[in-house]
Amino acid sequence: MNKFILIYSVYKSEVEAKEMVSKLLKEKLIACANLFPINSLYEWNGKMEDAREIVAILKTRKENWDKVRDFVVKVQKGSTYDCPCIIKLAEVEANEDYNSWIHSSTI
């Protein structure tokens, strides 16, 4: 059974997250995404930040990691985040039908 990966990525708004996911889907780089509102606390440039953001969990073939990472970084860098968050969480397995769908939905 082919495995796939989950990618964790953060966006400033739901609109921005949906735009990115739509672009990734159009390019067939991901099969789907789940969006979650979160509250992020972090230090940036010496200042404590408390931000509402959207997390996208992206699902794709493991061999698409570099393509998805580079695509997201290219689109986000300098426009929304100076330091985009895109993390490969894990190589995962699912039930056979779902796993097949992930692979048939991506290139």
Image: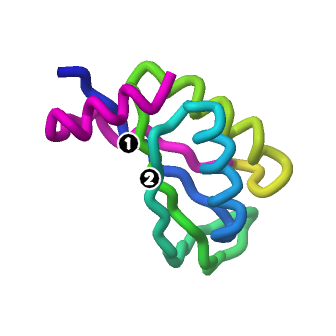
Instruction: Tell me which amino acid carries mark 1.
Output: Leu
Circle 2 SS class = strand
Q: Is residue 22 left or right of residue 1?
A: right
Q: Quadrant of the N terminus?
A: top left
Q: Verify whether residue 34 appears in magenta.
A: no
Q: Is residue 70 left or right of residue 39?
A: right
Q: Residue furthest right?
A: 79
Residue at 54 percent of width and 51 percent of height: 9
In primary-sequence order, the first of circles 2 and 1 is 1
Residue 6's label in the rendered image is 1
Residue in front for this viewpoint, 91 or 21: 21
Q: Residue 88, image x and y in percent?
A: 42, 38
Circle 1 SS class = strand
Which residue matches tag 2?
57
- Please tell me how crowded label 2 is: few (under 14), some (14-19), or many (20+) other residues with Cα within 10 Å: many
Mark 2 vs 1: CB contact within 8 A:
yes
Residue at 48 percent of width and 28 percent of height: 106
- Please tell me how crowded label 1 is: few (under 14), some (14-19), or many (20+) other residues with Cα within 10 Å: many
Residue at 78 percent of width and 57 percent of height: 80
Q: Magenta part of the protein: which range?
A: 84-107
